[in-house]
Amino acid sequence: MGKENIGLTLKVWRQKNEADKGHFETYKLSEVSTHASFLEMIDVLNEQLIVEGKDPVAFDHDCREGICGMCSMYINGRAHGPQSATTTCQLHMRHFNDGETITIEPWRAAPFPVIKDLTVDRSAFDQIMAAGGYVSVNTGNAPDGNAMPIPKEDADEAFNAAACIGCGACVAACKNASAMLFVSAKVSQYALLPQGQPERKERVLKMVAKMDELGFGNCTNTGACEAECPKGISITNIARLNREFLSASLTPGH
Amino acid sequence: MKLDAKIPAGALPEKWTKYRSTVRLVSPANKRKIDIIVVGTGLAGASAAASLAELGYKVKAFCFQDSPRRAHSIAAQGGINAAKNYQNDGDSVFRLFYDTIKGGDYRAREANVHRLAEVSGSIIDQCVAQGVPFAREYGGLLDNRSFGGTQVSRTFYARGQTGQQLLLGAYSALSRQIEKGQVEMFSRHEMVEVVMVDGKARGIIARDLVSGKLERHSGHAVVIASGGYGNVFYLSTNAMGSNVTAAWKAHKQGALFGNPCFTQIHPTCLPQTGEYQSKLTLMSESLRNDGRVWVPKTKEDAKAIQEGRKKASDIAEADRDYYLERKYPAFGNLVPRDVASRAAKEACDEGRGVAPTGLAVFLDFRDAINRLGKDVISARYGNLFEMYDKITGDNPYETPMKIYPAVHYTMGGLWVDYNLMTTVPGLYAIGEANFSDHGANRLGASALMQGLADGYFVLPYTIGDYLADEIGTGKISTDGDAFVQAEQIVTERQKRLMGIKGKQSVESFHRRLGKIMWEYCGMARNEEGLTKARDMIRALRDEFWSDVRIPGTMEEFNPELDKAGRVADFLELGELMVIDALVRKESCGGHFRLESQTPEGEAKRDDDNFAFVSAWEFNGLEGDPILHQENLEFEAVKLTQRSYK
């Protein structure tokens, strides 16, 4: 069993607003409990800064149980830090050593401008979803839930894609700032389900067009997105996205 | 003020069908001329905003998160109930209705709950049509599982992430309306005031959380869908940003607050490990199917475990107290949430808790693993064991889990009538933000059901009754005196907060409030403690307003200022909860008054004196709030005392 409390040096990205150039600031923390989560460690830092009359570090967070997708820190060069399949809020300090220096940065991608410090604007993801990430069914139109049997394996695979939390780690980890993993997860979910068929071709074309328009880069098959995804979204979804896009592009009338 | 719940006449099973067919309508041409504001984009808010927009209303939706998809409904794990009877196990609308009323310890309104059960099936149909990937059986049909407090399998689920999948479904419907221009979405915006014009809710003041600017938004109706207020306890399973501000502003503008003291404390959460702790994580209650709850029989053994001198495995079988099995032989480890929570607290209060803080009990799978094998347990709970390991660093296959109760849900909320309208004309409350369906205790898998019922299938109909009178109103200007004054009030309030320049952080006040609430208005309450708590909260509120330190300025992205506004409201709400708990001298559901127990120490309801909803009217912070009562009349169910012995 390791130590109960550790001392840390934090190098944190500070940036007043989008226009500011930004810089690293170094902070010392002593007596950080190894039971604390990474965000709770930042809470401790902020409490210290506030009491000292300084400006606390701004960062996005909400559910703190790994599902809302709000937390977004680049820790020691990795999206959501060193543990695989773990969001920053579920990363705990027992994975760090006494005396360690930790570098903390925001997501860095042109379509995700910095709002302040570690907080970025990910509304581009909402715009991609609005471009076609839905089944066009009004409330009240639905047939009985069991009217259309769906093979369990299709439903399970659709679920695996639908488990994306929209945190943007895939974009942050990608050297091209590509949003292909995010887009492919939603396209796959609907492509795998009968409910998604009527708008299948239109959907993929619209979502990809919006993704390109917003300045996300292309996929060059590095696989960093999959490696850093806290929910284990598979890169095979990107292969499906490419097939769906190609097939839709070749369909007359689309 | 005379409370009128506006329950339609007629037999219980026919009320909703008849009402829905006779409630006033707004024609498509007129819907275009009507603006509706929806605050909050969780299951209730997103489904309402999307459905109202589909009908042709112009909707403005607001959320404080960076995207509507992140509302805390997303964290719901277990599932959603619906009376589909797909399992052929005898389920029906009446059974779902009955279970909900009984589970709520007979403190909910029959007509609302029956309607909830009636529309439950349509929710599943709607979500399936949206492409929500529910769990399925090998034949391709929807799977169900059973949940606490029922004898049928009516819970639909998507692994342990049902809330996420349902919310993403509602978010997709919302996104479609945003693309069509029917919904204007305001993310990173917080509602900070309701604007009243001639006694009607006519708009809101919102703070753009990025720029810090205040904005005026008008509407012919305002819908509060901002969730529950469990964060008044500081530590809860809620998200960090979950707050009461929208509902509280509505309350201060005249909306009565229903049953504020009814809070649900969930028995199986991860215990607190230190002062830095910011939230508590829920572990699904399904674990109690195979886990056995225990603490050491003696304080000495407990102390040794607390200090790390002994491990669970060092305690001999004869020295363990499986207290739930001992006290409740009939139900054992599967007693309802409120009973299990209170028993854990009792054991820890006796000094027999097991974590370094003394505030935890064991949930032990040793016997289940010996009986069924590790593989079976892994198939049932593998993901939960992994999550536990990730957070605590302990392996539950080898050492028992440590759990402790945590605040999870608030049954209380804004009082609403059958139309889901508050006592302020034009101001509605839906989902967890209202008080209506769960009485004094909510059953598992019913929160998702209620949020979506309100948003998809109730409000879109009932709101027409009010808006039918608004078709000639025309666009509401935001230049009027009411808007100017409301904005002025908000500016003054923020200036006052910024001007305090004290020494203590917002967070430290919130933490202290949470401790008071947990100690005196938590799992067990009595007159002495509640009276004391009221004074303590008032003193803390005064201290907050004279010594809080908020860095930065008003005119910028300032999460500390946002938090200060929310904590200021919690400091007012906390007092109302305590007052409500004081007045309700009975025990019921999650509300346990030590003075009202059966000879065996169980909760004792007092139907003769307390079969009513407490609806509180704001009366200034110096004065006492005014209590209004809505008497609950039960036609379809017979009131009985619960027993789990």
Image: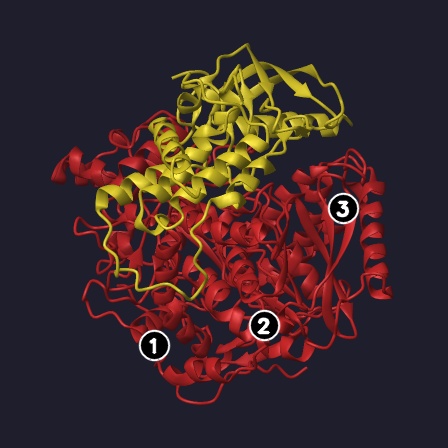
Chain colours: A yellow, B red
- Classify residue B434 by image quadrant: bottom right
Per the image, the residue denoted by label 3 is B543
Position of residue B615 relative to residue A165, above or below, is below
Q: Amino acid at mark 2?
A: Pro
Mark positioned earlier in the residue sequence (2 or 1)? 2
Where is mark 1, residue-wise?
A: B640
Q: Nearer the viewer, mark 3 or mark 2?
A: 2
The answer to whether tags 2 and 1 share a subunit is yes
Crowdedness of circle 2 by 10 Å Cα count: few (<14), some, many (20+)? Answer: few
Which residue is more in the foreground, B391 or B509? Answer: B391
Estimate the spatial distance between the alpha carbons at disc 2 and disc 1, rounded to whole Å: 48 Å
Label 3: which secondary element: helix
- Kindly identify which residue carries mark 2: B28
Amino acid bearing label 3: Glu
In the image: residue B229, left or right of residue B100: right
Q: Chain of mark 1?
A: B
Return the residue nearer the eye: B545 or B120: B120
Chain ID for label 2? B
Amino acid tagged 1: Thr
Q: Which residue is outermost to the front?
A: A252
Residue A99 percent coordinates (x, y): 55, 10
